[in-house]
């Protein structure tokens, strides 16, 4: 299962980079989204997939003896998802604003000398 997820992570990274190299801003945002998903999956894979009890120590024990799932990578991934949604929303609004002002979403047609109202 980890091999399949590792291959999927590599495919997401490569598809994200491929989309980021295109001239359209929409494809750029889609590429950034795919890169963020691939990074989240990579963090999840590095933390090792374990099925077990929650990381809560009972009152009558000093430490956990069973296999437990590490909550830190899960918390990092949840935080990254929330931040990613914020960045995606901002980028979509920015693309819309640039398209309204310039009439194009092509990166090559945009110039720094153009005035945006």
Image (cartoon, grey):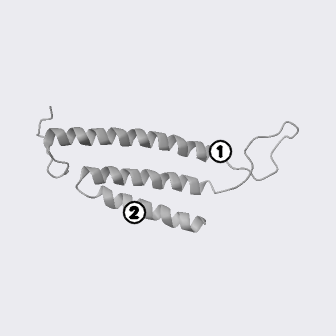
Residue visible at 20% across and 48% down? 105
Q: Nearer the viewer, residue 112 or 69?
A: 69
Badge 1 element: helix
Q: Is residue 100 rendered to the left or right of residue 69?
A: left
Image quadrant holding the C terminus, namely: top left
Residue visible at 59% across and 42% down? 75
In this orientation, does residue 112 appear?
A: no
Cα distance in 3D space between marks 1 and 2: 28 Å
User: What residue does disc 2 label?
Assistant: 14
Residue 71 occupies quadrant: top right
Residue visible at 19% across and 43% down? 99
Mark 1 or mark 2: whose residue is earlier in sequence: 2
Q: Is residue 56 rendered to the left or right of residue 96?
A: right
Q: Nearer the viewer, residue 85 or 36?
A: 85
Question: For the residue carrying disc 2, how many other residues have a C-alpha within 10 Å: few (<14), some (14-19), or many (20+)?
Answer: some
Image quadrant holding the N terminus, namely: bottom right
Instruction: Indicate the position of residue 40 as horizontal and vertical percent values.
Output: 51, 51
Contact (Cβ within 8 Å) of mark 1 with mark 2: no
Q: Which mark is residue 48?
A: none
Badge 2 element: helix
């Amino acid at each position: 299962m980890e091999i399949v997820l590792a291959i999927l992570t590599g495919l997401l990274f490569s598809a994200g980079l491929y989309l980021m190299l295109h001239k359209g801003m929409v494809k750029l945002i889609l590429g950034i989204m795919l890169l963020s998903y691939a990074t989240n999956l990579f963090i999840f894979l590095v933390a090792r997939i374990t099925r077990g009890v929650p990381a809560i120590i009972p009152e009558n024990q000093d430490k956990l003896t069973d296999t437990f799932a590490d909550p830190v990578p899960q918390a990092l991934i949840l935080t990254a998802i929330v931040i990613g949604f914020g960045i995606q929303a901002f980028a979509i609004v920015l693309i819309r604003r640039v398209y309204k002002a310039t009439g194009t979403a092509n990166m090559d047609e945009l110039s720094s000398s153009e005035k945006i109202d």
